[in-house]
Image: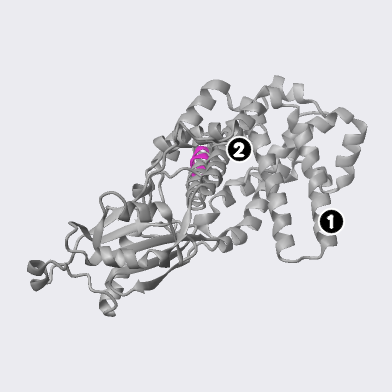
Amino acid sequence: MLALLGLFHITDDITIFRALNPYYAINFLVTYPEGFWLLGAVFLCTTGAEALYSDLGHCGRGNIRASWGFVKACLLINYFGQGASLLKHHNLKLMDAAAINSEGINAFYDLMPQWFIVPGVIIATSAAIIASQAMVTGSFTLINEAIRLNLWPKLKINYPSEAKGQIFIPGINTMLFVGCVAVVLYFRQSSSMEAAYGLAIIATMIMTTILFANYLVLHRVKPALIYLFIIIYSIIELAFITALLDKFIHGGYITIMIGFVMFAIMYVWYRARKIKNRYVEFVRLEDYVPKLEELSNDSSVPKHATHLVYLTSANNPKEIEHKIIYSILSGKPKRADIYWFVHVDTLDEPYTCEYSVEHIIPNDIIRVEFRLGFRMAPRINLMFKKVVEDLVANREVNVTSRYESQQRNNVVGDFQFIVLEKFLSQDNELPFLERIMMKLYFWIKEISLSEEKGFWIGTE
């Protein structure tokens, strides 16, 4: 539709093709220095297709690459058509924005025949809905990856289908709804949102430039090419952001506020985990293996469970958290036939799903290591069940209950997962800023999803 509407009017004034010559843009900025601030409005014309790649995680790189050229061409044809129509039907001079406003000119809808206005509005509205849906699902993907990389609090994630990558996060959906309603009620008209929107897009572009420069460094591209890339894009983006900052007080601050809140949550979650990890004490597992084996065979101690499964954060398979050993051996000991230690490692690859098993003591102490991509759902309940089934099929473990009556009937023993919760002691000796950081962390943790629900423990 965009391309056809532009084509119908592009012949209204062929001189519109002079816009292809950068001389006129440079001459305009030199002749009218105040025209520099128009870059903020021009910038919005270049960002109309960002929804195309906002849903990259679901559509795939190949599809977006194939369609990008087509979409860009349609947009340009439409813009050329708008320019030609304005030149023919309206005697406008450069920077005659007041005339456009006073005459009520809408360059886009003026391209449409009168009979096509209503269908055009319906199509444009449908396009906005589709684009917003892409933004919503793109947000789900980003938050899901942030959760997997421990950069965001755990949230409930639904999987509406078996298709890879299809997710729904009710909490984020609600937050987006409330945020959209609040912004609309605050700005009241779409033209007032341009400043906030433009500033958000240019901030995204600057971050993309920085990330791509890092990507080039990691792939050992020649430094001269990297610096050339950074200089060219930095000049363009700094010019745009300077022009857009003029609208900061007219609504652009909303973007900064929203971005700051998101950053604050991520920083608190990340920083608090670093502080917390400083106080996690790891011990050599081999030092406690005899005690665990002895407890497992001690019939005088009531059995806590047939299979006791602990989640461990120890990356080294020869180590274990001291608090887990304390939980098993101290106070009322937790006797079990088999102790399982499960560790989940999140990888940089998106869809890796692997596991390895180490039999520390066959049929007594077993460590399971899951290596999951950052887009894989950590459904430990199903994954652990699959691991146990494979081990039983290979006769590497016997999961039958060791109670005599149940053993005769081949009854499978019970599995009990244990997740150790942490809390902030009032007697801690943390520095003031770190104490505040930890208080914020535990407050966020209270309203976020628990560890057992985040790992789908105890659910089918």
Judge whether 112 appears above or below 158 on screen: above
The kind of residue on which mark 1 rests is: Leu
Look at 48% across and 48% down and name the residue there.
147
Please identify the quarter of the rendering in which residue 111 is found: top right
The reply to whether dot 2 and dot 1 touch (C-beta < 8 Å) is no
Residue neighbourhood size for the residue with mark 1, other residues' Cα within 10 Å, grouped as few (<14), some (14–19), many (≥20) = few
**Label 2 crowd bin: few (<14), some (14–19), many (20+), radius 10 Å:** some
Which of disc 1 and disc 2 is earlier in sequence? 2
Where, quadrant-wise, is the C terminus in this rendering?
bottom left
Q: Secondary structure at mark 1?
A: helix
The reply to whether residue 345 is in sight is yes
Residue 188 visible in the shown view: no
First to last magenta residue range = 125-130
Q: Which residue is mark 2?
A: 112
Q: How is the image coloured?
A: one colour
Residue 359 horizontal/vertical position (percent) = 36, 73
Tag 1 residue = 228
- Front in this rendered view, residue 259 or 276: 276
Q: Is residue 387 left or right of residue 76?
A: left
Whole-percent x, y for residue 341 in the image: 37, 62
